[in-house]
Image (spheres, rainbow, N blue to C red):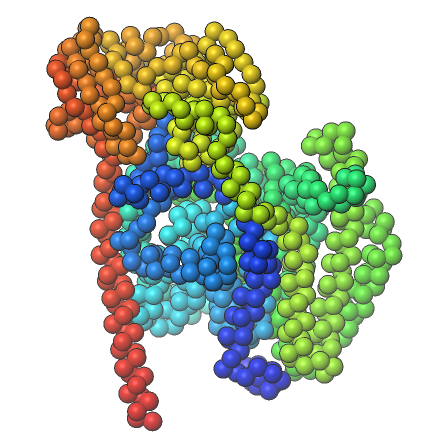
């Protein structure tokens, strides 16, 4: 302890930056690193054009229309015949009632303006929060600003964190940005309870909940749960004080409940929706695994959930990024591309695809290893190491199901999530934190003149230097080793006859990465060696380590960058000729799009207010997924029930059902002769099981105007409509509709709108009437004889209850923080006047 204090004093003397400016200087470095890395975004006005980015922008029109109408967008009528928009976390409106959320959203938008990039810059605000949070957390642990800075930079620029904004995953970083800050407060609460800290914890947890990425939130809680469990077990074994651990944990539980209430409108809506989505209910036809077990689990299908399982072999990408080909779009220039820079898909690992390797930097990995070994008796280091190992094992998913299957089958909520490799976000946070311990250990050890360690350092420098020379002059040695583990045959399944060319490109990348990796490790050890020999000072050491860490990460990260001119986004949403043709039809209808015979995962038609029977959503309603699975989207009867009037295809076609109307821009608009109106009368109903309904639909053996199927008895007399009966829409809004119905008896009306009972209410002349589930996923009502106005409105109870809770808790928390802030301010003035 005395040596550490002596070391800190020596560091302060050596630093050229005065002590009181060192924290701001570190934050400035974090900020500048972002500006430099994203310089094309900040200075050239470029943006990222990814599928997920386009998907989110597709609903801008919906949000804008809702704002003009003065309503909050709760329903999305543009995909899947309508679905909950807010509850499924697809669309969001302005939550003015959530005061704290409004303030931080405005802060992020202002940051975007300040960095000259409103579309992307707001996301960089959360990157900076993440880096700063890690910096202060590590500083709180080690009281070493250099170590803290290295950890902050390494987390912020870890390859699979930095590319989240590139690929349009805009909600992940805003979740994890608050994780280190929450962890820091929990550590303080472990030492002593404080009401202001507890209130701040509520606020930060609320901010973590806001983006709505449930899987990322789950992982943050998973990490903290393991931490508390580890500390309690350790305290009991060593007979240490455990009261502070319980105090911190209970406070966090209470803060989480209040934070949940502050975001109650969103999460109560999501809870309502969950049991109707693919994340919360089982498929109508159980998967092979479910059939084998004889039970269902109320979550995702195992095969679907484990599609992106990280294989044990891919751990090698931690040190050699291109070990499995790197990613989906790798920039390459060589003979194979006629010496032009082209982005080619080179990944050949077991996952369907990946955008980049899970790379954290070889320098960071080395420092993390040193940090673990030199501090292996430290409780936090022990916890971090355990969490890293557990996260790695879970990330393997079906590739190594020993732990994953236990989690999937028994751990609460876990089977709602897919992409096992996503849990590696915890590895990408805690490995750099351990690297901070490594930096601090190297500096402390060298300062106190540990002769044996100095000898190890010198030997390491010579060994790494020799390996660098060998890798540079005799690359074939390392490539022969690579070929033993990754033969060319591994590429054949994905590349076929092009495997030899792809393998040649990959091995050239691998050879270069091995050489550069050894060089960077040599340079890092060399810096510490020179610092020990008093050849360089603290400022030079800091600069050198920061440059090496960033160079190590950026050599990989820049490969993932593909910013586009802003006009490219505008071109995506420039009105194509087939859309202009469709917009001439002002009636109520839906379309269905096909590319190469399959519906694309695409929401762009919503931008032009064209309703689609398909779309892109990771948590769609179970009922429509069942229809896709059993009936299939090539079924004309289903097209009619979905009110599909037009088929949009990249292939010309003409048959008994489809009639060509328009061709242009590579698209063909085909009229569906089996079209049915959005609402029509049905003569009678029959009760049937869900699977029987879908099989009847698949076989196209019923007339939708003659019979509608229900799964529960209606217990009402239905009269067939007679001459003069009519039904027509008089208003169709985002989350309300109105029909004029002339019934000739007790008539059953079918509506081609998604059935969803949590919020939709129907009224006949102002009197509420039941909504029935017809033909598995659609709505129906019974209208008595006469002329009537039928209205339907979407008013989910969870949203309105949560809205009131959010406002109430906001007032209490912000009021409490304001009160303690004023008290602190006055106390500071009084102390100042006394002195």
Count of labels in the image: 0
Q: Residue at x 35, y 35 (%)?
A: 76
**Position of residue 621 measured from the top left corner of the image (x, y, whole percent):** 38, 31
The residue lying at 71 percent from left, 73 percent from top is 527
Reply above or below: 827 against 719. below
Q: Nearer the viewer, residue 86 or 652?
A: 652
The quarter of the picture where residue 100 lies is bottom left
Q: Can you tell which quarter of the image residue 484 is in?
A: top right
| Left or right for 795, reference 457 | left
The relative height of residue 533 versus residue 800 in the rendered view (above or below) is below
Which corner quadrant holds the C terminus? Answer: bottom left
Residue 558 image position (x, y, % from top left): 65, 53
Q: Position of residue 127 (x, y in %)?
A: 50, 59
- Is 529 positioned to the left or the right of 749 in the image? right
Dividing the image into 4 quarters, which one contains the N terminus? bottom right
Horizontal arrangement in the rendering, residue 527 relative to residue 717 (left or right): right
Q: Can see residue 178? A: no
Extreme residue in the bottom direction: 835
Which x, y percent locates residue 776?
A: 33, 20
Q: Nearer the viewer, residue 75 or 149?
A: 75
Residue plotted at (75% across, 43% down): 340
Relative placement, left or right, of 180 versus 371 is: left
Q: What residue do we see at 64% from left, 63% from top? A: 550
Of the pair 734 and 349, the residue shown nearer to us: 734
- Is residue 64 in view? yes
């Amino acid at each position: 302890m005395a040596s550490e204090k002596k070391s800190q004093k020596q560091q302060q003397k050596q630093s050229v930056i005065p002590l009181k400016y060192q924290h701001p200087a570190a934050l400035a470095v974090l900020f500048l690193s972002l500006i430099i890395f994203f310089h094309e975004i900040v200075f050239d006005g470029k943006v990222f054009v990814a599928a997920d980015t386009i998907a989110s922008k597709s609903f801008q029109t919906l949000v804008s229309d809702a704002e003009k109408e003065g309503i909050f967008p709760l329903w999305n009528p543009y995909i899947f015949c309508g679905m909950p928009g807010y509850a499924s976390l697809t669309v969001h409106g302005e939550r003015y009632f959530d005061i704290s959320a409004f303030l931080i959203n405005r802060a992020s938008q202002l940051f975007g303006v300040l960095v000259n990039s409103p579309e992307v810059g707001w996301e960089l605000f959360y990157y900076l929060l993440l880096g700063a949070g890690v910096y202060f957390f590590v500083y709180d642990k080690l009281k070493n600003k250099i170590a803290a800075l290295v950890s902050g930079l390494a987390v912020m620029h870890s390859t699979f964190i930095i590319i989240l904004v590139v690929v349009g995953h805009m909600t992940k970083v805003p979740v994890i940005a608050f994780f280190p800050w929450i962890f820091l407060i929990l550590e303080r609460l472990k030492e002593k309870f404080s009401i202001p800290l507890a209130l701040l914890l509520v606020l930060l947890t609320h901010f973590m909940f806001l983006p709505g990425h449930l899987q990322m939130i789950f992982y943050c809680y998973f990490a903290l749960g393991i931490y508390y469990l580890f500390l309690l077990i350790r305290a009991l074994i060593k007979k240490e004080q455990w009261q502070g651990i319980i105090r911190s944990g209970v406070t966090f539980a209470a803060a989480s409940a209040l934070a949940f209430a502050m975001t109650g409108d969103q999460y109560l809506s999501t809870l309502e929706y969950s049991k109707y989505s693919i994340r919360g209910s089982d498929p109508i036809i159980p998967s092979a695994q479910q059939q084998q077990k004889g039970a269902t689990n109320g979550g995702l299908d195992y095969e679907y959930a484990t599609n992106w399982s990280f294989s044990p072999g891919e751990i090698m990408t931690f040190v050699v990024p291109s070990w499995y080909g790197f990613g989906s779009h790798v920039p390459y220039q060589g003979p194979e591309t006629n010496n032009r820079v082209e982005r080619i898909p080179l990944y050949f690992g077991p996952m369907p695809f990946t955008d980049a390797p899970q790379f954290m930097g070889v320098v960071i990995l080395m420092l993390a290893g040193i940090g673990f070994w030199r501090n292996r008796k430290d409780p936090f280091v022990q916890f971090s190491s355990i969490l890293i190992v557990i996260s790695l094992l879970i990330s393997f998913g079906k590739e190594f199901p020993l732990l994953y299957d236990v989690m999937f089958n028994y751990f609460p909520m876990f089977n709602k999530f897919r992409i096992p490799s996503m849990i590696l976000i915890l590895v990408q946070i805690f490995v750099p934190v351990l690297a901070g311990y490594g930096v601090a250990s190297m500096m402390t050890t060298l300062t106190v003149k540990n002769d044996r360690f100095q000898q190890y350092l010198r030997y390491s420098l010579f060994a790494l230097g020799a390996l660098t020379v060998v890798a540079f002059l005799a690359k074939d040695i390392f490539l022969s080793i690579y070929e033993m583990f990754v033969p060319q045959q591994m590429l054949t399944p994905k590349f076929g006859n092009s495997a030899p060319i792809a393998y040649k490109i990959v091995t050239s990348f691998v050879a270069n990465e091995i050489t550069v990796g050894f060089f960077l490790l040599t340079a890092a050890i060399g810096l510490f060696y020179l610092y020990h020999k008093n050849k360089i000072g603290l400022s030079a050491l800091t600069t050198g380590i920061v440059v090496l860490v960033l160079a190590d990460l950026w050599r990989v990260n820049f490969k993932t960058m593909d910013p586009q001119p802003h006009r490219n986004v505008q071109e995506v949403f420039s009105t194509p000729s087939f859309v202009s043709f469709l917009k001439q039809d002002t009636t109520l209808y839906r379309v269905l799009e096909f590319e190469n015979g399959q519906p694309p995962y695409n929401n762009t038609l919503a931008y032009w207010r064209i309703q689609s029977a398909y779309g892109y959503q990771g948590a769609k309603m179970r009922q429509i997924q069942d229809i896709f699975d059993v009936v299939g989207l090539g079924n004309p009867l289903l097209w009619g029930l979905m009110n599909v009037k037009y088929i949009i295809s990249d292939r010309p076609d003409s048959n008994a059902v489809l009639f060509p109307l328009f061709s242009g821009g590579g698209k063909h608009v085909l009229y569906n002769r089996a079209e049915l109106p959005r609402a029509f009368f049905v003569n009678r109903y029959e009760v049937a099981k869900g699977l029987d309904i879908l099989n009847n639909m698949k076989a196209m053996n019923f007339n939708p105007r003659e019979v509608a199927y229900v799964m529960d008895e209606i217990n009402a007399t239905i009269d067939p409509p007679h001459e003069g009966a009519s039904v027509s829409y008089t208003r169709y809004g985002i989350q309300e509709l109105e029909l004029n119905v002339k019934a000739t008896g007790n008539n059953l009306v079918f509506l081609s709108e998604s059935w969803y009972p949590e919020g939709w209410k129907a009224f006949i002349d102002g009197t509420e009437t039941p909504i029935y589930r017809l033909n598995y996923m659609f709505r129906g009502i019974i209208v008595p004889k006469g002329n009537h106005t039928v209205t339907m409105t979407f008013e989910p109870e969870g949203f309105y209850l949560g809205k009131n809770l959010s406002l109430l808790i906001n007032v209490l928390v912000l009021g409490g923080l304001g009160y303690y802030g004023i008290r602190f301010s006055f106390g500071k003035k009084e102390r100042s006047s006394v002195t």
